[in-house]
Amino acid sequence: MRITQFNLVKVVAMICIISCISDFIVLFLLGNCYPGYSQLKNTISSLGASVSPVSYVISLWWIFIGTVFVFFGIIIGKAFDINHKNVKIASLLIILYGLGEGIGSGLFKADRIEGGLTKPFIIHNILGGIGVIAALILPLIMRKLITKKTMFHFYLFSWVVFIIGIITMLLFAIRFSPNEHNFLVLYKGLWQRLFLLNLYTYFIVISIIMYNKEV
């Protein structure tokens, strides 16, 4: 049976929802396969470092997840008015997130060497940073796309997601502090996962809206 544009939007929306939920499950399961790894104290990136026993598996998973978000960013234009400026921006931001935090993290490992950082680690951080910035900006664009008049609760939700995103990102950024025993620095893994939970919840809500929208 021919796949219509309407069906394609629904399929991609469902895949995005499943992928967001699955990513948390995979991160938890693979983290438990890494002796000494703490879900609250260690960063997600360290799962993909060369010294990690799950490095190869998690890298492939991140590339898959990143690809899902790239397609999600492309298809969002089919769910809304593709000629609308804010749709194009939202699409680009989601694609950048998929390329940076997903595919980029999978291709470039966060490896450290004694006394410095490796080139892959630096590229990993740069691409991840681009992805995070894109994710932070997304709610500000989506609130213009789905306005206060058309969906008031989503408009408010976008602001909440943006604020929580800023707070959790700043908390995670404190990991660069020289005081490694500081509570905020120690629990960097927690802040990173809260940032991810906040973002994935937003992606899931957008996916539900796309699924229910008549194309």
Image: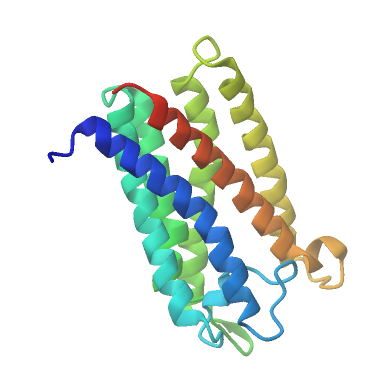
Q: Residue at x 44, y 60 (%)?
A: 102
Residue 108 in sight: no
Q: Quadrant of residue 185?
A: bottom right
**Location of residue 149 in the rendering, given as x and y in whole percent from the top left corner:** 53, 9
Residue 205 in sight: yes
Q: Residue furthest left?
A: 2
- Determine whether, in the image, residue 198 is placed left or right of residue 209: right
Q: Residue furthest right?
A: 182
**Location of residue 172 in the rendering, given as x and y in whole percent from the top left corner:** 70, 57
- Determine whether, in the image, residue 83 is placed left or right of residue 126: left
Vertical comparison of 29 with 138: above or below: below
Q: Residue at x 62, y 49 (%)?
A: 197
Of the 4 image quadrants, the one containing the N terminus is top left
Of the 4 image quadrants, the one containing the C terminus is top left
Vertical comparison of 9 with 130: above or below: above
Q: Residue furthest top?
A: 149
- Determine whether, in the image, residue 78 is placed left or right of residue 91: left
The image's colouring method is rainbow
Vertical comparison of 158 with 144: above or below: below
